[in-house]
Image: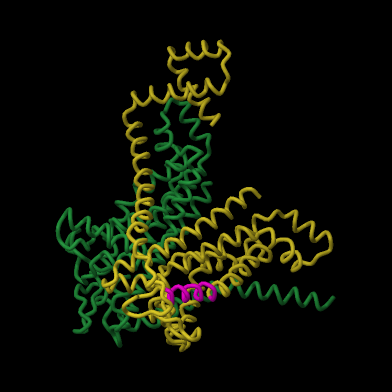
Amino acid sequence: MNLSKAKELFMKLVFMAAACTSVLAVFLICLFLFANGLPAIGKIGPLKFLLGTIWRPSNEEFGILPMIVASIYVTGGAIVTGVPIALFTAVFMARYCPKKIYRPLKSGIDLMAGVPSIVYGFFGLIVVVPMIRKLFGGTGTSMLAASLLLGMMILPTIIGPAESAVRSVPESYYEGSLALGATKERSIFFVMLPAAKSGILAAVVLGIGRAIGETMAVIMVAGNQPRMPAGILKGLRTMTANIVTEMGYATGLHREALIATAVVLFVFILIINLSLSLLNRRSENEG
Amino acid sequence: MKAEATAADRQISLNPLKENQIIHKSGNGKGTGDRALTGMEAGGSRTRFRYPGSSLLAFLTYLASFVTFALILFLIVYIMVKGIPYLTPELFSPEYTSENVSLVPSLINTFIMTLVSLAIAAPLGIFAAIYLVEYAKKGNRFVGVIRITAETLSGIPSIVYGLFGMLFFVTTLKWGLSLISGAFTLVIMVLPLIMRTSEEALKAVPDSYREASFGLGAGKLRTIFTIVLPSAVPGILAGIILAIGRVIGETAALLYTAGTVAQVPESLFGSGRTLALHMYVLSSEALHMNQASATAVVILLFVLLINGLSGMLAKRIAKG
């Protein structure tokens, strides 16, 4: 009898310890990133590091503003190309899709979410880049290529949550609007979508997080020039790409500066996560 | 469906002309279903004419969905068509050389990596979920902390995991560039995914199961392992399959933790590249683009298989 009680207690502790792993992991990630990255920012000087426009490790010049701007531009581009398509598709899946083809379409979107970023990158390299080269000239590896590719990659990330946000709006809203004489589209886009606002915004923020953190696909199509972005047909280098391209051979302060780049990226992600959980809480309260 | 139909009918009855028609039709004694259908169609075409904004929105909705699904189809078909002709026997020779760029060692490494990381991540994730669902009391502050950290973890980009793995497992723990460093990095990465799906699966088990088990005199532990877990298996498995998909496709987190040696290492503490890394190295060297697309086909086949499996499981869950 006592033995089984001890066993119960022991397993409870095991379960609890397992639950603590995620807390421990976040703690360790913060600790190691900040401990290795912050000293470098101190050595370079926070302003020089964050606002410096020249990245020339051989001259000990570490300004990552071009990379920050590039990450924001590329993410913005992905939002402009991806979000409208994703939202309309989400509306289609929730309200228009005939029942018969819903399952195959849904698994198509799941498939799109499951395709690894390296495969997207390769697709970008052999399809998107040559297409841009043909249409606009230049090398093709550009901000435009990265934006288009990222716009495509964030589609499934946004469609899933946005669809369930639209679905969670009570049917009576739709019926009430129809009863007042509104058309189907008007009822969906001007009554249901505003009601699902928080959920849809959360989906978009999720997409932003995915776009800004995306690495491999962007490296393959963005051109990787570490200078201020000069136009949508010019190459650029995002923060993520900066880390991957140079980490292989970096040493000393250069290496630390790269880790510091990851710290900046991490802070961006934390802000995005925070706004996401705030939005989620709000949509839960509304529902 | 029914609600929509009645709503559409009502819409038409705003128009006196149509109202007569409907009365006439119902007088004819047609089936209610038929009537609803004609009513809806008539309403649709009529309103479309009157409200160009609505037809534009409808058009955009169909157009955007068409673009989305055309993109998926195009991506899959294009890579298949491009890569399948290069699935040559040399690409599958047992040893890697810089000439045949065989993917077999990477394939074996991928299997090892998947096995090791999930052997650790699956029990951890499931146990954590058990704690959250079965033990933790509602409104517990500690549970809130766990939830928030799990959410944070699932939002961190893979390159940050890669850097952390490099700093912690490779450098601090001195495991070097190795399969084990890569596997542990991936454990942290897929943990929130397994935790979340297992939690949902456990929550879906009806409380009456637990109560019946307690009522028969079983202890908490026994109830969990013999009653609750078995009924939650399909949901948990679906999560694990998703995690396998992420492990197979991961590149950025492994580049500086597992390394890019194109051999199967002698032990877990040796470096070895997975399929996705193999593909990255091939395409960034730009010498073997055809072989890279063939590797992409192999990866895509895995992804298709995994999606098929999880789809089947989802169907089983839906059936109950």
Residue at image point 43% right, 80% down: B272
Which residue is rendered at x = 84% and y = 63% of the image? B217
Asked which colour scheme the image uses, the reply is by chain
Residue B206 in the image: state x and y as whole percent.
70, 53
Q: Is residue B198 above or below residue B261?
A: above
Residue situated in front as seen by the camera: B284 or A274: B284
Q: Is residue B161 visible?
A: no
**Residue positioned 50% across, 31% down in the render:** A175
Decide which of A148, A278 is in the foreground and name it: A148
Whether residue B106 is in magenta: the answer is: yes
Is residue A268 depicted above or below B165 in this figure? Answer: above
Across and down, in percent, residue A96 comes to: 44, 37
Residue found at the far front of this picture: B89
Q: Colour of chain A?
A: green
Which secondary structure dominates the residues rendered in magenta? helix
Query: How far from the left and from the top, in percent, is residue B4?
Result: 51, 29
Q: Magenta residues?
A: B104-116
